[in-house]
Structures are given as structure tokens and as C-alpha cells.
Amino acid sequence: MPVNPSAVVNAYANAAKLAGQAMPARGGEAAGLGGGGFADLVKSAIENASTTGNAAETKAAELAAGKTDVVDLVTAVAETEVAIQSMVTVRDRVISAYHDIINMPI
């Protein structure tokens, strides 16, 4: 399944907005030339997925206790699913790029 890299970046930007975090600035830091741009982006994505997963678990417990609606639970689970799918997509692209580099003729 082909994935548009800009769609992945937009997904991370939206996830960062939901989490109240700012995306790293484009340029030197985002390219990994300073400040660990890509590593910070991956760390942020992992933390975001963990946070949304915890929120979904909390909503499930609240639903069991009768303190929330099913809609809130479904929304939280959908947000977690999007965060995890985005992480998996980036992981697959990084592995593919690694394999492309390894298979380059010298």
C-alpha cells in the first residue's frame, strides 16, 4: 500500500496539535543537522501514541463505570488507532529506506 510521506507528516502535525505540542522547525533541526530533529519527532510520536492509548483505556474504564458516553470511547480508540498506524507507516518507510541504502551498489 503506497503511502504519501506528506500525509504522514500532516498526521503527525495533527497529532501534535491534539497533544498541545509543537512540531520541530523545518530546516537544520528537522533534517537532523542539529537538535536531534528526527529522533525527537519519533520520540514525540511514541509519547503521543502512549498518551492516546492511556486516554482510551481511561475512557473504557469510565464507560464501564457509567461515567462517559460510547462516543467518547470510540473517539479515543480511533485517535489511538491513527497514532499507531502513523507510527507503523513511518517505521516501514525507515526500514524500506535502510534496505534501499544497504542494497545500493558500491
Image (cartoon, rainbow, N blue to C red):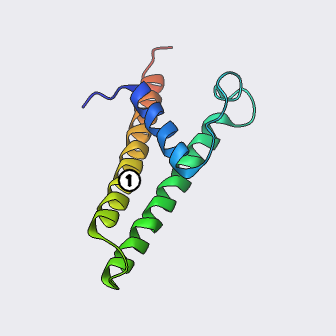
Q: Amino acid at mark 1?
A: Glu
- Residue 34 located left or right of residue 26: right
In this view, 68 is above or below 4: below
In this view, 31 is above or below 72: above
Element under disc 1:
helix
Furthest residue toward bottom: 65
Furthest residue toward right: 34
Q: Say which quarter of the image contains residue 74.
A: bottom left
**Residue at the location (47% across, 55% down)?**
49
**Residue at the location (45% across, 14% down)?**
105
Q: Say which quarter of the image contains residue 88.
A: top left
State the residue in front, 105 or 47: 47
- Residue 10 located left or right of residue 16: left
Q: Position of residue 65 (x, y in %)?
A: 35, 85
**Residue at the location (43% across, 41% down)?**
91
Residue at mark 1: 79
How many numbered marks appear?
1
Q: Position of residue 33 (x, y in %)?
A: 72, 26
State the residue in front, 67 or 82: 67
Q: Position of residue 23 (x, y in %)?
A: 61, 37
In the rendered image, which quarter contains the N terminus?
Answer: top left
Q: Residues within 10 Å of mark 1 (few under 14, many from 20)?
A: many
Q: Position of residue 36 (x, y in %)?
A: 70, 37
**Residue at the location (62% across, 46% down)?**
21
Furthest residue toward top: 106
